[in-house]
Every structure is written in C-alpha cells, then in structure tokens.
Image (cartoon, grey):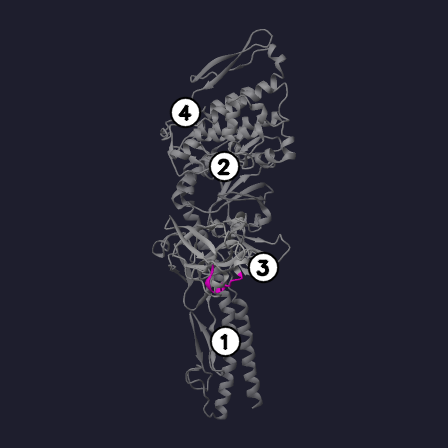
C-alpha cells in the first residue's frame, strides 16, 4: 500500500506541474502588440481600440489615456467623454453629458446642448432611453439615421410638485422615449415653454439626457438636484466598417483573426463584428487572438476526481486510469475500480509511471515541433507580403533597368526591425496621415529615416513600384533621396536619407527658430523648393505631381538647403496626359480650390500649394488659423487680399524687412499672389516660378542694395527655343539699366475644366 500511494502521489504531482505549465501558457492578449497599452486605469483596452494610432485599427477606435489630472488614469473617447468599459460583444460604456437650460425670474442663466459626433458608433437602442426632466420642458434628440437627419422629442409638464410621482415617468415632471435603431451623431436640446416663470420656485431648469434605463429611476428631487449632476452612463454599439459579413469577410482587409467567425450585429448597427468559435476564447480581432480553451482548467471539476482530463480542440475528454472502469465524467458513469490481484496492481503502477514519462516527452517534443512550425509560418508570411507588395514586379523592373539596379536596395525585414528596435516608439521622428517615420542607424553606420505606411492599397501596387523606380532615378539636390524599400512586411517600408535640421514648419512657427530664419535663408528655401518641384514637373523621366506641398514636407539640412519629402500622396503623370482624375487628397489650407471642386489634378495644384508655403515664409502665419476673425482664417485669401490692397508690409514678419530687401520681398509676394490664383490657368508654371526666384536670389547675392544696380547689367535670359524675354527698367537716379528676365513657356498645355461657380 505504501508503494502504491507513493506512485499515485508522483502521478498527481506530475499532472499538477503540467497543468500549471499549461495555465502559464494560456494568456489571451487583447492589445495589438506587447508595446501597446492594454489597460487605462481600471478599463481594459482591447484591439481594435488603442491609445496610440499604431495600436488602434483606425482613428475611429483611437482612445486617450488621461492621467494629467492627478487622479487615477481615465480612458477618454473623442474630446472629453469618459469611457468606463469596452465589451468585446460590441458595446462601449461612456459617461454622457446632460443638456440643461436654467432660468431665474424668466431670464436665461445657463444653457448647455451636448453633442456626440462619433460616426463609427451607434446609440444602443436596447440599453438606453431618452429622458426629459422638468415642469415647463420640451426636449429634442437630433441625430442621423441611415445618413438622413432624424429627430425625436419628449414633453414634461407639471403645475405643482404635488402632482409629481417618484418612479413615474409619464410626462408629469419626467418623460421618457424609446431610442430608435441606428441613431448616430446626436445632439441633445432642452428647452422651456415659458422660461420656467410659473414653476421657478420648485423647478427652474429643463434637463434632457440619454442613459442606461436600469441606471435611472426618477425622483422629484431631480427637478432641482440635476443642476449639480454633469453626466449619466450611456451605451454605444460599435462594429467594424459599414459592410456586412457577406461582403467584408471576402476582402483581404477583414480584421477577423484565426479560429473566429464573422457576425452581423443586430439593432440596425452598420458593419460587422468578430467572435471566437465554440471552444476558443480571446480577442477575435487579433490574427491569433482566439486560442483554444483548456476546459480541464476552466471547468471545476471537468471530470471525475479519478479520471484524467484531456483538452482537445474545442472540447475535452475524460479517461479513467488503467484498472478503472467508466467514462470518467461527472454526469456519466464516473470511474470505478474493480477488485484487482497483486500482479494487476504492479501493472497499473508501471503503466502510470510510463504515462507520466510519456507526457513529459510529448510536451518537450510538441514544443520543438511548435517552434519549427512557427518559423516556417513566418517565412511563408514574409514571402506572401513580398508578393502582394509587388516584389516580383519590382524584381522584373530592376532586371530590365540596370541603372535602377545600381541605386535601389531591397532591405530585409530583420535588418530594419533590428535598426528600429522592433519599431520602438522612442525612435519615432513624426507621424502623418499615411505613416510613421523612424530615425535609425543602419549596420554600416549610415543615418536614415524609415517610413512605415499605415495601410497598403492593393490596387495601387504597380503604381507604387513604378514610383519607387522613378524616385530612385531622381538625382536632384533638393529632393530627399530614396535609398531603398522593404516589401517583406504587411505594409511597404521606404528608407530615405536622413535630413538633420527638421521641418520648415518647425522653423517658421517656433518663435526661437523663426527669429534666426533671415530673409536670405527664406528666399533660399523658397528657391530650392521651387527648383525641386520644377524638376519633378518637367525634367523627371515620368512627371510627378507631389499633391501635398507644405512646410511639414520640406526638410532643412544644416546649411538650410531645402529637401522636398513625403511622396505618400504623389501621382505619376503619363507623358500623354496633362491632368488626372483622382480622389481629392491633400492638406486643408494648402489644397488647390480648383482641384478640390473638380477632382482634376494638374501640375498647377502644386503651384497653388507652393504659393501658400511662400505666404507662410513671408508672414510666419499658419495656413489655417482659427484664433482671429473669420476673414483672417485662410492664409491664402488673407495674403492675396493684403497684396492686392497694398497692405503687405502690415502682415510681414517684423524682422524680415530692411532697406536692402524691400524690392525682393515685394516681388516674391506678387509671385506668391499669382500662384494663389483661384483658376489654375492664371497661375505660372513651377519652372517660371523657379526662374523668377532664382533671379531674385541672384539679385540678393550679387546686387546688395540699389547702389549696386548702377554698376552692371545682369542677363538672366536663358537661351532656349521656348524662351520669351522682356526688360524691366530700373530708374533709381543712376544711369538707365535694364534687367532681362527669361521665362520658359510650359512644355505641356494645361487643360482645366471650368468650375460650376464660374471661378
């Protein structure tokens, strides 16, 4: 009996150790990566939600973890909505503000009409109700349903507090309305019929709010006390995108991971949701988020105390030990031991020891097999990404073009992951609408900038590869050089030369840096940028329209030479075309108004954006500013009006103007005004702009002041068949002098459709 008990204790000990190892392995992650925050305060943050852009599916699911108040951290949605819970079943619990309108002696004292503009989420019609509180009150809930405006209302009247019943919400002091399905982007509006004149003693305010039905029970005290309360708990329904499962699950960008299924949400909620299959648990929105449930650990007890529980995919089995009979289940026959002889008992002991050793060997072998399969799967995944990102097409292009083969480099994913420390956030230089830029040092000690895209449009792969080939052939000192790319990752990576002095935007709008940015430096930056854009429009093998020219995309080196960067929205223009019809993209404030209205992209769109950049260089103001009066918000309109009305010197940066550069500043301002013409055909080409700026810069360098104009004539006319010259007379009290200025006529005719508004 002693030997038998020792063997049994050994088996139990081994089983406990193995179960603890399994338990340690079963941890279901909820965030996109280990670098992503999966909790804020006491609220879990599961993917597709995230507290940074690279941790959330998109901006609709981007939250903010706010710990600036000194209190425990709070999860914030939108601008200031506190999130109390995120459910994987498609619910988001928030604290929503109360609409209020309060009066004193018939005069309005306070009014608040809260709104919720969250187009990705729907107001839950099963969990919430619309409540109106007051004795002289009517309220509206204005929203959108099926993309059309929609409103519901509620009225609450009472002439005496004695008529109000606690717990009753039938229109006397309290009114409630069911929430219809599919409401989005709502506004609450609480109003009074008679400014609460007749009921101000016991109810001076109107209140309206949406809240969880079970969280609110009406009390007559609320007619007064709700003035002090700010929020009520409310539930939003969330889903992915706007398409149902029938369409979404057949697309490559479906977010449902392995061992999961697509589910259409009820209650008029647009989009789809993901859920783990039977027998699996975890986050179904992660690629490997749904993992097999170990029922042997989660169900207590899963089997008879004597039986061995074995986890299988989606279920479990119970096995009685040798020498026992039955199915081993709690609700079955269990395990019973028949009378056994001494030799039979020895066989049982040996079998138990053999089973224990076998389990250990099986565990070690299974771990080795798992690691091998994981490495093989990673290799196949890289191969898949390489093909879908156009790797084969790029190889074909390189084999046909020996020049490109010498300049472009295809980097390995491991090389860039090591350089970026697996894309650590501490290496981030900046983030834009199309990707994140990292500052890294390659193994050859070369400093580079690595741009990681946020998404990859499969329909644009061939165009992306063509753009890579063209950019590697660009040899212009004022265009950031593309060193290579990596196609083994889910989204393509681009490797650029590193520019040391940051963006032009930082130098213009930072007070300390702006004061050291002299007129000579600003003119040099404008000239460099114009030269780069003119090269892209007229000298590249395939013309390129940048489409997002702005100070944030112009980098400066230590000598203040400008480098045009960020070709994420650029488009290649076939030689037989003068315009492209595209989806309007760009940055507000810099966007060509003609392109915005017609979707017809031409080289003149870059000219308009460049004009805004020059206006920023001259004034130090931002392209869009909401601090001043409405007439000053758009810099392009404000600047053009100032030049036209001869008010330029009132809006210039104070430290720019001197007696020696007034002429150059006025000339540059007039050139910028021409670039900002509403009609594209009224704007100069970038080649004309570059030549004019080059002329002014040479005048700045070689003719310092009006006195120098008397000493020589400078010929700026470039002798080409497409050049027309004219003379500018200078009368400054010296001998008559003329400066010849050459403009090259655009090599391609700009064809623009007239706009409906006549501009």
Along the line of sight, which residue is nearer the eye, 577 or 359? Answer: 577
Looking at the image, is mark 4 or mark 1 earlier in the sequence? 1
**Which residue is disc 2 drawn over?**
407
Q: Position of residue 584 (x, y in %)?
A: 41, 38
Q: Position of residue 334 (x, y in %)?
A: 44, 84
State the separation of the CA atoms marked 4 and 1: 82 Å
State the separation of the CA atoms marked 2 and 3: 50 Å
State the separation of the CA atoms marked 2 and 4: 37 Å
The answer to whether residue 505 is above or below residue 530 is: below
The answer to whether the residues at label 2 and label 3 have Cβ atoms under 8 Å apart is: no
Residue 512: quarter of image: top right
Secondary structure of residue under mark 3 = loop
Looking at the image, is mark 3 or mark 4 earlier in the sequence? 3
**Which residue is disc 3 drawn over?**
41
Residue stretch rendered in magenta on the structure: 211-221
Looking at the image, is mark 2 or mark 3 earlier in the sequence? 3
Q: Position of residue 371 (x, y in %)?
A: 50, 62
Say which mark, if any, is on residue 630.
none
Secondary structure of residue under mark 4 = helix
Secondary structure of residue under mark 2 = helix
**Which residue is disc 4 drawn over?**
681
Along the line of sight, which residue is nearer the eye, 389 or 632? Answer: 632
């Amino acid at each position: 009996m002693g030997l038998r008990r020792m063997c049994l204790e050994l088996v139990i000990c081994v089983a406990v150790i193995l179960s603890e190892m399994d338990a340690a392995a079963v941890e279901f992650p909820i965030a996109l990566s280990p670098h992503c925050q999966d909790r804020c305060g006491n609220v879990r943050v599961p993917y597709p939600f995230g507290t940074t852009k690279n941790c959330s599916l998109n901006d609709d699911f981007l939250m903010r973890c706010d710990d600036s108040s000194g209190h425990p951290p709070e999860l914030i949605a939108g601008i200031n909505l506190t999130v109390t819970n995120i459910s994987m079943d498609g619910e988001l619990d928030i604290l929503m503000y109360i609409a209020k309108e309060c009066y004193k002696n018939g005069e309005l004292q306070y009014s608040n009409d809260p709104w919720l503009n969250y187009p990705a989420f729907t107001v839950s019609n099963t969990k919430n109700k619309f409540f109106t509180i007051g004795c002289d009150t009517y309220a509206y809930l204005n929203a959108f349903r099926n993309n059309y405006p929609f409103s519901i209302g509620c009225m609450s009247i009472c002439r005496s507090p004695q008529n109000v019943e606690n717990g009753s919400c039938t229109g006397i002091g309290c009114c409630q309305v069911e929430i219809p399905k599919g409401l989005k982007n709502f506004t609450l509006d609480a109003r009074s019929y008679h400014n609460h004149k007749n009921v101000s003693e016991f109810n001076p305010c109107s209140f309206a709010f949406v809240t969880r039905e079970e969280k609110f029970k009406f009390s007559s005290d609320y007619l007064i006390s709700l003035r002090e309360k700010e929020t009520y708990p409310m539930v939003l329904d969330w889903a992915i995108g706007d398409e149902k499962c029938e369409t979404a699950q057949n697309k490559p960008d479906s977010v449902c991971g392995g061992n999961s299924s697509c589910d259409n949400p009820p209650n008029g909620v647009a989009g789809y949701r993901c859920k783990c299959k039977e027998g699996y648990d975890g986050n179904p929105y992660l690629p490997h988020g749904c993992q097999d449930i170990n029922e042997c650990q989660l169900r207590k007890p899963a089997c008879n105390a004597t039986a061995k529980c074995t986890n299988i995919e989606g279920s479990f089995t119970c096995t009685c030990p040798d020498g026992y009979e039955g199915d081993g289940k709690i609700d079955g026959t269990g395990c019973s031991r028949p009378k056994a002889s001494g030799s039979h008992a020895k066989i049982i002991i040996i079998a138990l020891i053999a089973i224990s050793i076998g389990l250990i060997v099986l565990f070690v072998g299974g771990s080795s097999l798992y690691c091998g399969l994981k490495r093989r799967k990673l290799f196949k995944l890289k191969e898949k990404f390489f093909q879908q990102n156009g790797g084969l097409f790029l190889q074909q292009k390189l084999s046909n073009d020996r020049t490109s083969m010498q300049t472009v480099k295809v980097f390995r994913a491991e090389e860039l992951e090591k350089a970026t420390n697996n894309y650590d956030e501490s290496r981030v230089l900046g983030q834009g609408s199309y990707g994140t830029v990292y500052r890294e040092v390659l193994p050859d000690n070369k400093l580079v900038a690595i741009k990681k895209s946020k998404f990859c449009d499969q329909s644009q792969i061939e165009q992306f590869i063509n753009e890579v080939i063209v950019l590697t052939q660009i040899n212009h000192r004022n265009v950031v050089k593309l060193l290579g790319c990596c196609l083994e990752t889910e989204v393509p990576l681009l490797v650029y030369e590193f520019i040391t002095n940051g963006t032009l935007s930082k130098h213009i709008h930072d007070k300390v840096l702006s004061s050291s940015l002299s007129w000579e430096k600003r003119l040099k930056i404008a000239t460099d940028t114009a030269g780069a854009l003119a090269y892209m429009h007229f000298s590249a093998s395939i013309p390129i329209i940048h489409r997002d020219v702005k100070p944030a995309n112009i980098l400066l080196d230590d000598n203040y030479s400008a480098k045009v960067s960020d070709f994420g929205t650029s488009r290649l223009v076939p030689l037989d075309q003068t315009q492209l019809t595209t989806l309007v993209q760009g940055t507000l404030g810099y966007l060509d108004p003609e392109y915005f209205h017609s979707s017809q992209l031409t080289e003149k769109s870059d000219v308009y954006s460049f004009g805004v950049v020059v206006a920023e260089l001259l004034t130090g103001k931002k392209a869009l500013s909401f601090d001043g009066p409405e007439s000053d918000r758009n810099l392009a309109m404000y600047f053009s009006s100032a030049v036209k009305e001869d008010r330029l010197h009132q809006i210039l940066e104070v430290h720019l103007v001197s007696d020696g550069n007034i002429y150059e500043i006025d000339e540059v301002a007039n050139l910028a005004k021409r670039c900002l013409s509403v009609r594209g055909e009224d704007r100069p080409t970038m080649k004309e702009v570059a030549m004019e700026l080059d002329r002014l810069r040479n005048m700045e360098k070689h003719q310092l002041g009006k006195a120098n104009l008397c000493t020589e004539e400078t010929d700026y006319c470039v002798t080409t068949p497409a050049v027309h010259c004219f003379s500018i007379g200078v009368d400054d009290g010296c001998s008559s002098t003329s400066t010849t200025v050459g403009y090259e006529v655009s090599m391609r005719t700009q064809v623009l459709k007239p706009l409906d508004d006549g501009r």
